[in-house]
Image: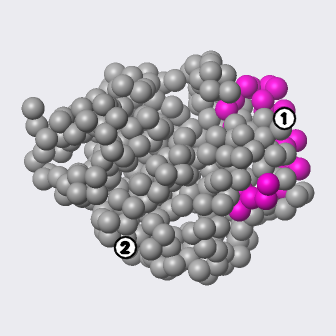
């Protein structure tokens, strides 16, 4: 038995990955990548079998953000040419939900730029979510920025199942990425979402000049935070942002990162998110041997892969799309 299978067996028996073992995963020799992904799949299979969860983003509010996040085309310091608009109308959110439903997307993600939502924006989301839940029965995730407890409670009561607020990078690297809010601000919002009863979703962006230790630290931090869903984004550097031209990643390293997150967070939803097309490239299918969830369609200000291509990839792999009905049953079992 190889060292990766031995480690997977220990994880499945309840052991936690040490810092030294985590570093070995990120430094796995390229010629052993299939062995590593096979071991990661044994963990994934224990908790998710061959099911894949599909997620779709609705960019409900674009640009107009006062924050200075170095990766983001919507930030106050970005010079990227993007569409900027205020919160879209309810009908637009409902049209997106219908498209998600028709494509058998399990989770519909309503994302809005900005430091945090105004009460009026929360009202708009609440009204739309109530109709989406009644009409389509989709699982709804909201990502609206820093959240106040009373806002979180309103979203929960309206039917929002999950709230996303990514930590993005390690605590030690955070100030290199943004200074307009703190790492603790982000952690606090995830905690507020948890306290309201919404499922916490929090993830990372890989490729922002962080060290391998930073990657390990953020994976461990998300474990400590007990995030139910962990989106793993790979930086798609956008011209006009401070990280313009940064290109540190390659497909094999991205696979090692996905494996690391599966080993450290064995039972959690690991989602391959933004930047998978440009960073994993032809190795995208292998990522699903560690991850059990993907975004389909476009992201916030960058294009994704055609939905039909994603469905073909899953079919070719022999994976099964988790249906809306299965997601409902899973939510009911956890509530």
Q: Is residue 305 visible?
A: no
Q: Which of the two residues, 264 or 282, is positioned nearer the viewer here?
A: 264
Quadrant hosting residue 328: top right
Sort mark 2 into few (<14), some (14-19) or many (20+) by Cα contacts within 10 Å.
Answer: some
Q: Which of the two residues, 208 or 20, is positioned nearer the viewer here?
A: 20
Q: Looking at the picture, does residue 134 appear above or below residue 250?
A: above
Q: Locate residue 176, reporting x and y percent.
A: 48, 79
Sort mark 1 into few (<14), some (14-19) or many (20+) by Cα contacts within 10 Å.
Answer: some
According to the image, label 1 marks what residue? 130
Q: Locate residue 153, reporting x and y percent.
A: 81, 46
Image quadrant where one finds the N terminus: top left
Quadrant hosting residue 233: bottom left
Q: Which mark is residue 209?
A: 2
Q: Which residue does the image show at 43% across and 60% down from the upper left?
A: 218
Q: Which residues are magenta?
A: 121-149
Considering the numbered disc 1 on the image, is that residue within a helix, a strand or a loop? helix
Q: Locate residue 15, reporting x and y percent.
A: 31, 39
Q: Which mark is residue 199?
A: none
Q: Is 139 a magenta residue? A: yes
In the rendered view, does 172 fall on the left or right side of 264?
Answer: right
Q: Locate residue 229, reporting x and y percent.
A: 53, 42
| Label 1 close to label 2 by CB (< 8 Å) | no
The image shows a total of numbered marks equal to 2
Q: Which residue does the image show at 71% across and 76% down from the upper left?
A: 66
């Amino acid at each position: 038995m190889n060292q990766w299978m031995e480690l997977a067996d220990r994880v499945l028996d309840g052991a936690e990955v040490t810092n030294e073992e985590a570093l070995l995963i990120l430094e796995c020799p390229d010629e052993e990548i299939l062995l590593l992904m096979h071991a990661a799949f044994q963990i994934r299979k224990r908790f998710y079998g061959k099911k894949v969860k599909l997620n779709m983003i609705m960019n409900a509010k674009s640009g107009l953000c006062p924050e200075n996040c170095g990766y983001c085309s919507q930030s106050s310091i970005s010079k990227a040419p993007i569409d900027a608009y205020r919160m879209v109308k309810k009908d637009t959110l409902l049209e997106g939900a219908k498209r998600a439903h028709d494509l058998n997307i399990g989770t519909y993600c309503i994302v809005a730029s900005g430091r945090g939502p105004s009460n009026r924006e929360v009202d708009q989301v609440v009204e739309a979510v109530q109709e989406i839940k009644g009409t389509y029965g989709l699982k709804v995730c909201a990502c609206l920025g820093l959240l106040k407890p009373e806002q979180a409670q309103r979203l929960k009561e309206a039917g929002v199942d999950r709230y996303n607020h990514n930590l993005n990078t390690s605590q030690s690297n955070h100030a290199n990425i943004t200074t307009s809010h703190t790492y603790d601000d982000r952690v606090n919002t995830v905690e507020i979402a948890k306290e309201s009863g919404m499922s916490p979703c929090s993830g990372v962006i890989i490729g922002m000049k962080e060290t391998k230790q930073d990657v390990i630290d953020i994976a461990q931090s998300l474990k400590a935070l007990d995030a139910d869903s962990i989106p793993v984004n790979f930086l798609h550097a956008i011209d006009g942002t401070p990280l313009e031209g940064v290109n540190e990643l390659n497909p094999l390293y991205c696979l090692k990162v996905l494996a690391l997150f599966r080993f450290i967070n064995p039972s959690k939803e690991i989602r391959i998110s933004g930047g998978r097309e440009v960073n994993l490239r032809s190795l995208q299918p292998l990522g699903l041997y560690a991850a059990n969830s993907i975004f389909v369609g476009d992201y916030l200000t960058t294009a994704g892969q055609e939905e039909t291509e994603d469905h073909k990839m899953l079919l070719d792999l022999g994976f099964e799309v988790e249906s809306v009905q299965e997601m409902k049953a899973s939510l009911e079992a956890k509530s």
